[in-house]
Image (cartoon, helix red, strand yellow):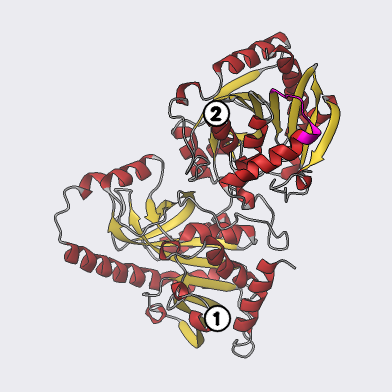
Amino acid sequence: MSVKHEEAVKYIKKLHPEEYSIGIILGTGLGGLVNDIEIKSAIDYSEIPNFPVSTVESHSGKLIFGKLSGKNIIAMQGRFHYYEGYSMDEVTFPVYVLKELGVKYLIVSNACGAVNPNFRKTDLMIMTSHINLLFDNPLKNKVVNFNSGSNFYSKNLIALAEETALENGIDIQKGTYVPVQGPNLETVAEYRMIRKFGGDTVGMSTIPEAMTANNIGMEVLGLSIITDEGFPDTLRVAMLKDILEAAGIAEPKLTLLIRKLVKKINN
Amino acid sequence: MSEQLEKILQTSGLIKSKFPKNFKPEISLITERNIDIKEFSGFDILGELSFDSLFPDTENLKRNAGKVLFAKCKGNDIIVYNGRFHYYGGIDMRDIGHMIYVLRYLGINKIISIDEVGHLNPRFHCGEIALIYDHINLIGDNPLIGKNDTELGIRFPDMSNAYDKDIYKKVFKIFQEEKIKINESVYLGTIGPQSETDAEARFYREIGADVVGYAIVPEDITSVHAGMSFLGIGLITRELVADKMSEDERSEKQKSKDQKESLNTAVKELGKVLKEIIKKI
């Protein structure tokens, strides 16, 4: 927490003095969850002192306060990607703010490509681990809790997510997410390498936020929707249209899962 | 117009103003500064321009990096970058990308990029040529990071044809016809410039690479982004076969002598086919 974070927190707390224990970062393909939130109010990122501002037009950039399945939640609509040129401190700025607003449980979502040949487009995946290929780290120059590795992704939340998926008839994979810088997609040789050293999916986000949240003591759950298949032997040109179509099919499943899951979180 | 594009147009305008008469290039050749273009037969140099004159008020980093040559080969007008900016030289990725975007605004649609490489694949030999069909980016930086100008390309370029398959096939055939050994290669890009350890060489081989180099990856990514076809050629000058490296008892002096010799051999080999490549692609 720096002065910059404090200023942002102070501004938000004046508008929202109550505690919010669940935070959700809405990635690509989870925008629809907003429709399920009973929105109390939304604050534009640009209003909040020191908050980075989203440059991507498809992400609108709002902090949403409201209720989901009867629980107080804060949702981040629009996030900051490393490939847009943001520093790691900017990418993770909101996580520190969420922590001060009371968030104990952070659900982070993303869209990614599969390299595990048992996975398919439109599948959901619970992140159980990651291999950091970002060549950068949000915890540089920070006080680091070195003991969190084994429970990096909250075992408690993973179990809860699996149970919820089962109860609601949603197929869900578990696997290791490999974050890369992007923004170009991977070459065939890169997909092959990533699979070989133990990755199940590849993406360009989530890990900076997850590392930060974990380091400052939040319970983290990472959820992915698979929108692309990066199988090296049969790789085809990735069309944005197909990716959006896959996201469209996966989104209702993820939305349902999160809705039901949030209800179960004991806060 | 983005600041990035403005700068690109500024540099390309400057180069264009020095074009010889009726010069209409579509192909560009990029090589290291230490390779003398005159070694390649069939090239007529019509004019030249130093990188320094393009970036007069720039920091020392970019000084003496190379020159732009206007050349003619088999009836084709060609822009040659004889020398390039290196990331290990402290140059920003965006500046490396800049030089590639400039080519697009000079009318280029095909890039032939030549780099010195070390070979991890034990079946390759120094002095031979690596034909690059794919790469692994382990540089830890990317020329496309930052705000995307859609005028230049899309946000998430697909890399499934990063090394143009049609051009690759044509070049493959030319090598066959000329009876030059073909080393089909996955190129691994690292920052460099230190020589790899044997453990690194083993690791790179293990994850699927055949050769290692420092220059081609950012050039390729940028050219894919800008919609240009890319041909990557490696001149093999160093042996990085892990199991042999620990037994290498040559002195540093001998190594660099051998490296120079390998480069000369590879340049000569390439010289036999380069004009044919330019003609056919």
Residue at left 75%, top 40%? A11
Q: Amino acid at mark 1?
A: Leu
Residue A194 in percent (x, y) is at 49, 37
- Tell whether position B48 is magenta: no
| Element under disc 2 | helix
Direction from residue B240 to residue B20 in the image, left or right: right
Q: Quadrant of residue A40?
A: top right
Depicted A18 relative to depicted B173: above or below: above
User: Which residue is nearer to you in this view: A233 or A160?
Assistant: A160
Q: Quadrant of residue A146?
A: top left
Q: Main secondary structure of the magenta part?
A: loop
User: Which residue is nearer to you in this view: A176 or B132?
Assistant: A176
Residue B158 visible, this orientation: no
Q: Which residues are magenta?
A: A14-21
Residue at left 49%, top 81%? B52
Residue A171 in percent (x, y) is at 67, 17
**Residue, disc 1:** B54
Q: Residue under mark 2: which chain is it in?
A: A
